[in-house]
Image: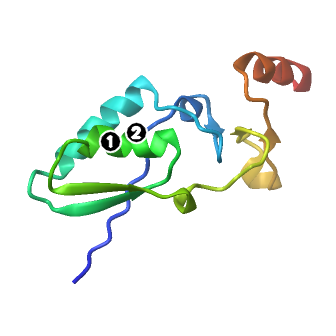
Amino acid sequence: MIELVFETHATSVDNEDGLASGHWDAPLSALGEKQAVELGHRYPPGTGMDVFCSDLRRSYKTAEIAFGGRDDILIHKDPRLRECDYAVGPVLRTLEWPRRGRVELMCRSRTERAAWSARSG
């Protein structure tokens, strides 16, 4: 029998800013690195499994921190496992999004995001 287990990538710097990164290659935050270590502890040695992750840093670094160096676990990077592509960089999910069905597109730099937020009130 094949058992499939789904885990998300650990927290990225964009996640901490309330952004959905899409194909923007946001790195893990310090918290995310700690979460990745904890993920590895949930699967003790001898688990014997394959790990499939996207080729984006937040995904494969989660896998590498959690399982890198273990002989019983193989890590496979696959770009087909990327999340949705927003085409323009990170997206800020506003509080109105569930109600209005819209998202606010944001610039990639924190300075530009802050300037945009100040203009839009």
Q: Is residue 7 left or right of residue 82?
A: left
Q: Residue at x 18, y 52 (%)?
A: 43
The coloring applied to the image is rainbow
Q: Residue at x 49, y 39 (%)?
A: 57
Identify the mark at residue 24; answer none if there is no mark.
Answer: none
* SS for callout 2: helix
Residue 25, x across and y down, in percent: 59, 38
Give the farthest residue toward the left.
46
Q: Quadrant of residue 67?
A: top left
Label 2: how many Cα within 10 Å (few below 14, some 14–19, many 20+)? many
Q: Is residue 4 above or below residue 113?
A: below
Q: Is residue 57 above or below residue 119?
A: below
Q: Is residue 68 left or right of residue 54?
A: left
Give the farthest residue toward the right.
119
Q: What is the spatial separation of the Cα atoms under label 1 and label 2, in whole angstroms? A: 5 Å
Q: Residue at x 91, y 21 (%)?
A: 119
Q: Quadrant of residue 47?
A: bottom left
Residue 37, x across and y down, in percent: 26, 36
Amino acid type of disc 1? Glu
Label 1: how many Cα within 10 Å (few below 14, some 14–19, many 20+)? some
Q: Which residue is mark 1?
A: 64
Name the image quarter holding the C terminus.
Answer: top right
Residue 32, x across and y down, in percent: 40, 33
Name the image quarter holding the N terminus.
Answer: bottom left
Q: Is residue 13 left or right of residue 110?
A: left
Residue 71, x across and y down, in percent: 15, 51
* SS for callout 1: helix
Amino acid type of disc 2? Lys
Q: Quadrant of residue 106?
A: top right
Q: Residue at x 59, y 32 (%)?
A: 14
Discs 1, 2 touching: Cβ within 8 Å: yes
Q: Which residue is mark 2?
A: 61
